[in-house]
Image (tube, rainbow, N blue to C red):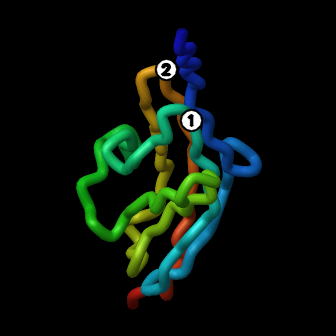
Amino acid sequence: MLLNVVVPPWSIITPPITNESAIEGTSFTTPLTITGDPFPVSSNIVITGDGVSVQDGRITVNIGSGNGASNFTIHNVTRTDSGSYTVNVTITAGSDTAVVNLDVYFLPVF
């Protein structure tokens, strides 16, 4: 007899809701641990920004290989990237979320 135990995913940003800052024109990265059984793949992840699905290739979650060490990244940060981002991971056993609140600092325009 084969017993298959399905473990719900979990994600951790220490703390689970984190407040971060970035400078306009740079890349921003914060660590994120994602794991579960079956192991989540990129198609199991949905990123929303201020409640709207993010379809911007600059904003990604890179999943680590097996150990869960992953990163939430925004390349070439712009001032409009300020806001709250939710990373939702869903597998057959359930789902979990982590939240990143981001403030973007930029030079004033006169």
Q: Residue 76: where, in percent of width, then height?
A: 39, 81
Q: Which residue is mark 2?
A: 93
Disc assigned to residue 97: none
Near-viewer residue (7 or 79) = 7
Quadrant of the image occupied by residue 23? bottom right
> Is the N terminus in the top left, top right, bottom left or bottom right quadrant?
top right
Near-viewer residue (10 or 108) = 10
Q: Residue 44: where, in percent of width, then height?
A: 37, 39
Mark 2 packing: few (<14 Cα in 10 Å), some, or many (20+)?
few
> Is the C terminus in the top left, top right, bottom left or bottom right quadrant?
bottom left
Near-viewer residue (107 or 35) = 35
State the residue lying farthest toward the right: 15
Say whether marks 2 and 1 touch (CB < 8 Å): yes
Q: Earlier in the sequence, mark 2 or mark 1?
A: 1
Residue at 69% of width from left, 42% of height from top?
16
Identify the secondary structure beneath mark 2.
loop
Q: Is residue 90 above or below residue 23?
A: above
Relative to 97, 16 lies left or right: right
Q: Which residue is mark 1?
A: 36
Residue at 48% of width from left, 43% of height from top?
86
Q: Is residue 40 above or below residue 55?
A: above
Residue at 58% of width from left, 42% of height from top?
35
Amino acid carrying label 2: it is Ala
Residue at 26% of width from left, 62% of height from top?
56
Mark 2 → mark 1, Cα distance in angstroms:
9 Å
State the residue lying farthest toward the left: 55
Amino acid carrying label 1: it is Gly
Mark 1 packing: few (<14 Cα in 10 Å), some, or many (20+)?
many
